[in-house]
Image (cartoon, rainbow, N blue to C red):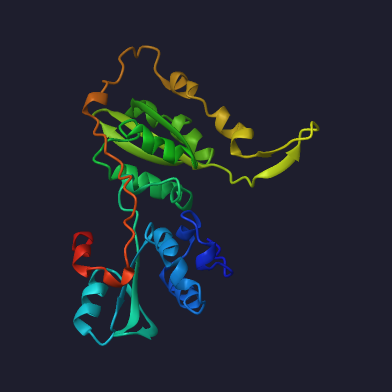
């Protein structure tokens, strides 16, 4: 992913902040503190930063605290002295589970990374995900899911080969003698453009205005074409057994970054 060297704290949003790493954020903070309006805007900056990063100010000579933070996967950077503090510890939030996905971070993942999250989600597969999570994933990816007997799923020239040829990443989940296959492909990135309707009004055209012909060709009718003529049984409906996970929609608490208690991070280890 290409970095934007011109980014600053003033230009950060809850979307583009996912494109930077700990070292870049550290430099942005150092640069921002040189301006007189930093204290005035600090709360605004922290509301954005805390959606993606944890931050601790500390004294680098405190070897016990430095060691503790490093064990919690913080990166330690030197910073201009402020009282007893002369360093800053920064840790980027990892996307560990499916409920960590948001509309802001989903666009910064690759298809295989999303499939890994689905695979780790207690065997729910695609159809067992909460609809809100499905909507987030589908905002940035084309997703298809098929449940077929293993022999049909792996038939030469069948659905797996067709999806691979169409550029999809594939996750296979065994369901007894059946297989749930989840197919994911990134949607094309389309810049918003303005055009005139000729009626004195302009509007923006985005992804919804553009049809993806490649995806529309991959219709669910492929499943019917691959089923044996003598196959009348349907896969059991396990929707009742699927485990929905509640999304954590909590808004980050605004607090002085100088007063964070490092012990609160133990649960992340």
Q: Residue at x 30, y 72 (%)?
A: 258
Number of numbered discs: 0
Residue 139 % position (x, y) = 48, 39
Please state which of residues 24 and 163 is positioned toward the viewer in this rendering.
Answer: 24
Q: Residue at x 62, y 40 (%)?
A: 206
Q: Is residue 108 above or below residue 6?
A: above
Q: Is residue 209 left or right of residue 131?
A: right
**Residue at the front extreme of this rendering:** 40
Is the residue 149 above or below the residue 16 in the image? above
Image coordinates for residue 173, horizontal then vertical, percent: 30, 36
Q: Name the outermost residue toward the bottom.
A: 61
Q: Quadrant of the C terminus?
A: bottom left
- Residue 126 is left or right of residue 6, and the answer is left
In this rendering, is residue 192 above or below 94? above
Where in the figure is residue 226, as x and y percent of width and height? 44, 22
Which residue is drawn at the image coordinates 34% and 54% (left, top)? 95
Above-or-below relation of 139 to 30: above
Where is residue 3 drawn, in percent x and y?
54, 65
């Amino acid at each position: 992913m290409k970095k934007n060297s011109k980014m600053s704290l003033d230009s950060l949003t809850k979307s583009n902040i996912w494109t930077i790493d700990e070292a870049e954020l550290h430099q942005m903070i150092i640069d921002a503190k040189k301006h007189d309006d930093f204290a005035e805007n600090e709360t605004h900056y922290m509301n954005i930063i805390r959606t993606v990063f944890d931050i601790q100010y500390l004294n680098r000579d405190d070897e016990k605290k430095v060691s503790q933070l490093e064990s919690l996967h913080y990166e330690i950077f030197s910073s201009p002295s402020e009282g007893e503090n002369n360093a800053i510890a920064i840790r980027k939030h990892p996307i560990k589970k499916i409920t960590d996905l948001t509309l802001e971070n989903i666009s910064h993942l690759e298809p295989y990374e999303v499939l890994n999250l689905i695979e780790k989600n207690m065997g729910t597969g695609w159809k067992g995900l909460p609809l809100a999570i499905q909507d987030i994933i589908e905002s940035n990816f084309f997703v298809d899911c098929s449940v077929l007997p293993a022999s049909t799923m792996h038939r030469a020239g069948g659905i797996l080969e067709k999806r691979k040829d169409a550029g999809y990443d594939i996750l296979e989940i065994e369901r007894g003698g059946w297989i749930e296959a989840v197919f994911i492909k990134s949607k094309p990135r389309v810049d918003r453009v303005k055009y005139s309707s000729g009626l004195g009004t302009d509007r923006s055209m985005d992804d919804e205005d553009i049809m993806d012909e490649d995806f529309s060709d991959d219709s669910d009718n492929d499943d019917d074409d691959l089923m044996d003529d003598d196959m009348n049984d349907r896969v059991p409906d396990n929707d009742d057994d699927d485990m929905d996970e509640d999304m954590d929609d909590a808004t980050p608490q605004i607090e002085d970054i100088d007063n964070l208690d490092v012990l609160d991070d133990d649960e992340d280890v």
